[in-house]
Image (tube, coloured by chain):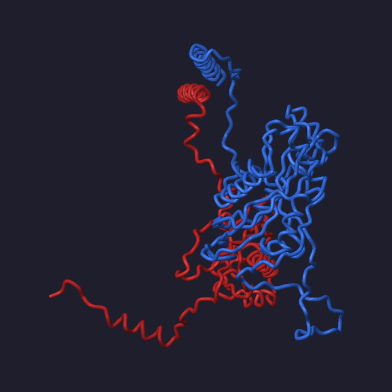
Amino acid sequence: MAAAMTGRGVAFIRNISGLLHSRLQVLAGGPQQLSCLHTSSSLEAKTWERRNRKMYPPQLPDEPRRPAEIHHSRRQIKYSKDKMWYLAKMIRGMSIDQAIAQLEFNDKKGAKIMKEVLLEAQEMAVKNHNVEYKSNLYVAESNSSKGKYLKRIRYHGRGMFGIMDKVYCHYFVKLVEGSPPKTEKKTSFDQAKEYVQNLKNRTIIHSL
Amino acid sequence: MAMPMRRTLAALHRATCSTLKSGEASLDVRHPVPLFLPVRTKKRYFIPPAVGLKEKKRGNTEAKAQAAGIVFRQQYIERPINIACTAGIFDPYIPPEGDARLSTLSKEGLKQRTEQIKQSAASQLAIRKIKEHDSHFTSKNFAEQAQEIFIEAHNALTQFNKEKLHSLVTERCYPEMTRGNRYKTIHWRFIESLEPPKVVHARCPDMVSKGNLYGQVTVRMHSKQTLAIYDRFGRLMLGSEEQPKDVLEYLVIERHLVNPYSQWRLHGKIVPSWAPAKDPIIKTVMIPGPELKPGQEFDALNYQVPKPEAVQWNK
């Protein structure tokens, strides 16, 4: 037991000396080796807001008029990203007036915040992005994502504890000028017909 | 138990000494490496850092930062003042009514032409003062130079060439020219000049101290230009590419005379009170309506949109 311990101890010490060696080497040739780490942390990259700065070249008079796109977001909302997702999914594809009306009469906490974001985005569109009619917008994309969480301790019995997350979320919305695109609604009868057709199309391949 | 432990510790000591020696040989740097490294098992529970925050709030963070050696640079509560140009147009030129409406051949037109250059003694005095500092100054040459500065400045604006624009346009005029234009495309063309440009007005105000002279010269030019502004998405906002417009402008060009390296730069434009209204932008805009008392109704049929006052203003 003692001999085994010393053997492990010596190996361990050799390991440490190796580490010291490598540490000294790293100190010597630092910056060249560290350039392989990827520099932009995803926490500071605000790509959604940067999409508002994209410029298009002037259109020729015979081209169809390009619809204006406005990206807007709000960061670190004190709400759960999963609960926010339900509201975001609800307003996808609605016109902006309809979306604002739906959110105004929704009982959730996130609905009030989302309505503020939509109104801000509408004002921005008219002021800065040369949108003519403020009602002529529809929600093209609407998403929620996880913000930076704060961690706290939740005390349980018997000296046990859990880590409680104080949840935050981000909300992103993209408004596009024009009337909302019409999605074809499939009736249940159509879906049933399709299912039966798929069953009928089954064949045995490579058979005689 | 004690014997094997001492042996391992001795081996560790030897190992660290050897690495230190090799390190010294290669780098010639001393690192204070502890001889006895503490060996711990892996921490198997996580306490979030917020637990210790309640004590931290009472502590003096500033004193701790100072003790740690973090130095904050001295914060200067200052506001920068630009002395390369003046803040406005002093004693602005008031263009006579009906300028450029009457042709030169009629009697009134001739009167206007003769009045213009012999306008006032102050302008002549100012021109004399400018000639003291800048010996190559003549009204005829200067008018053409002014037009060239104007054309080059607007070309730089279409390309958004900031450095060139700063050298052709004063710091007061630059934000007025470029505000809101960052995400827009501007196509501007100078087609021809309908009348030769003329110096109509000059003033030499001195700022702050007595000898600090700035020269401001107003040049009148009548020309044909095309302007088309496209927004971020390439849609036409204002004007058209092909249709030229006759433009009568009063440019104010300024120079800091006392500075030998200063340049004559565009300082602003004077818009007279009788100027015709500009073309509206292509999109429809909502104007705020009148303020109504509770119970009052908005009468859309009889409501007249208030027009702005006809006042001369400097652009």
Measured as percent of width and height from the top left, residue A41 is found at: 56, 45
Quadrant for residue B279, please give it: bottom right
Residue A72 versus residue B210 in the image, above or below: below
Residue pictured at 59% horizontal, 42% vertical: B164
Viewer-closest of B203 and A152? B203
Q: Colour of chain B?
A: blue
Say whether residue A5 is visible: no
Give the residue at x 47% y 23%.
Answer: A18
Placement of the C terminus of chain A among the 4 image quadrants: bottom left
Query: Where in the figure is residue B63, as x and y percent of width and height?
Result: 81, 31
Q: Nearer the viewer, residue B288 or B245?
A: B245
Residue displayed at 77% across by 72% down: B307
Residue A137 lies, with reference to residue A71, above or below; the image says below
The tint of chain A in the picture is red
Q: Residue at horizontal 47%, vertical 22%?
A: A14
Residue B175 shown left or right of residue A202 in the figure: right
Residue A207 appears in which quarter of the rendering?
bottom left
